[in-house]
Image: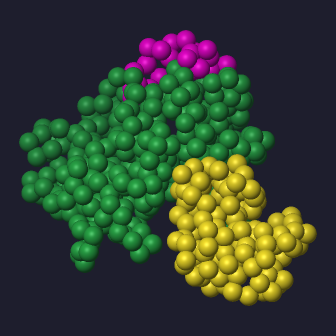
Amino acid sequence: MLKFTEEHEWLKIEGDVATVGITRHAADQLGDLVFVELPEEGASFEKGASAATVESVKAASDVYCPLDGEIVGINPAIVEDPALVNSDPEGDGWFFKLKLADPSAANALLDEAAYKELIA
Amino acid sequence: MDDHASLKQTPLAALHRALGARMVPFAGYEMPVQYPAGVLKEHLHTRAAAGLFDVSHMGQIRILPASGKVEDAAAALETLVPADILGLGVGRQRYALFTNAAGGILDDLMVVNRGDHLFLVVNAANKHADFAHLQAALSESCSVEMLEDRALIALQGPRAEAVLAELWADVTAMRFMDVAEAALHDIDCLISRSGYTGEDGFEISVPAASAEDLARRLLEHPDVLPIGLGARDSLRLEAGLCLHGNDIDPTTNPVEAALTWAIGKARKPAGARAGGFPGADVVFAALEAGPKRLRVGLAPEGKAPVRAGVTLFASEDGQEPVGSVSSGGFGPSAERPVAMGYVDSAHAKPGTALFAELRGKRLPVAVAALPFVAPTFKR
């Protein structure tokens, strides 16, 4: 199941674990990323809390936790090479895996059509 | 104020849109922050080949002496700036600072001796205040004109000379800070060999009506890419050049800003025309006793950029701040984060280990010599 937030994150949900990243639209708007800071595995976040930081040449931006949950995996490749987020934001440029406290809460997020409408 | 409808346009606004620029409000103008290439590529291209910048938002001002003698305009301007203007040769340009009564920096600017008058380029955000300041102080001996009908185009980078030489062969005879009139494709331009990137390059004052024509001709060259304000900022930061409003402002004096070199020898305490500019007593006291704080380069040790406003500490757990960052970001050519800021003089020596407080963490940064990249000016 693929879901989106109004803060331009995407979630690919398999069982009770969501792989989270930022959308192509967000990556394009941010421009060339030069720094990514990821949360630590095992950390828990509430929906809307800042879970990661990205920096372009010009500015720093927060990546918010899209739902309540615990970090069960991170993508060190984007820390090593932040440009990966620009080149493949919805694939190899993923940020973290989140074990959802309440998987049913994902139903309230945007589906792909609703997200496309948001950024249109 | 930042409502796009109220923003002014430069003569190149239509060209920026045609080139796919992302436009942002800046100093009351709608300006290109980046083009489709993006800030990183634009920055690196400028250092490798040549970049074209629209800096038409900056103020271009003429000071015309009533006597017709440029010395009279120079002497009048010296009452506002600590630079040696009387010693500036015809066809030469010099960096200067408008100071206030407290020795603070109202703006930084370029001054050109045009033989029978002075030509100034001032920052966009301050240009109306600068103009009023000049009029108030100089109107007895000079007339002061804001040139509203001219654009300003910068061509910067190691290929800038070769590109411009295709339009005007004599450009190769110009040295850093020379200024000359030339016809580029029959367009009367005023060209200075200077810039804001740390690279060799030129700034070209051109009639507004011909600006797009000239810009398009320069962009036709395969070595030239259009460059936005984003890369302009990272280029000047790596070059250790101040941005007024960030690194210098009315609360910083030239000595603590590490701009003592912008005080002419003749204007210093032992000089032939010592003082005579606003706040000279404060500036001279700082020269004599040494500044309490100093603008320095800052090299974060990690990969995280450290930006303007971040507080600096002498140790990982120290409570008392020893300074703060005035400009910072990622340096694409330095391939690392770069910054500058003000630190207490006791901590200003290059190599001094400091800590920047960022998102609740103390990150190590080292005081570093400026600039981060060696300039390539043609002296």
Nearest to the observer: residue B221 or residue B117: B221
Q: Residue B350: give x, y in percent of width and height.
A: 22, 49
At 66% across and 70% down in the image, what residue appears? A97
Asked which quadrant contains residue A79, the reply is: bottom right
Q: Residue at x 55, y 72 (%)?
A: A41
- Return the residue found at the far top: B169
Indicate yes or no whether the magenta region holds residue B177.
yes
In which quadrant will I find the N terminus of chain A? Answer: bottom right
Residue B99 position (above or below residue B48): below
Q: Quadrant of residue B179?
A: top left
**Residue B376 higher or lower than A28, as above or below:** above
**Figure quadrant of the C terminus of chain A:** bottom right
Please state if B342 lies on the left or on the right of A119 as rendered: left
Which of the pair B377/B316 is nearer the observer?
B316
Res. B198 in view: yes
Q: Which stretch appears magenta?
A: B162-185
Find residue B204 and report its horizontal and vertical position in percent: 55, 31
State the hue of chain B: green
- Where's residue B159, x and y in %? 54, 22
Identify which residue is drawn at 65% across, 82% down.
A69
User: What is the quadrant of residue A23 in the picture?
Assistant: bottom right
Q: Which chain is yellow?
A: A
Q: In the displayed structure, would residue B145 be above or below residue B352?
A: above
Q: Along the horizontal axis of the image, is B308 left or right of A97?
A: left
By what rule are the colours in the image chosen? by chain
Task: State whether residue B212 is above or below residue B104.
Answer: above
Please check the rendered image and state whether residue A55 is part of the magenta-colored stretch, yes or no: no
Instruction: Please indicate whether residue A61 sits to the left or right of residue A67 in the image.
Output: left
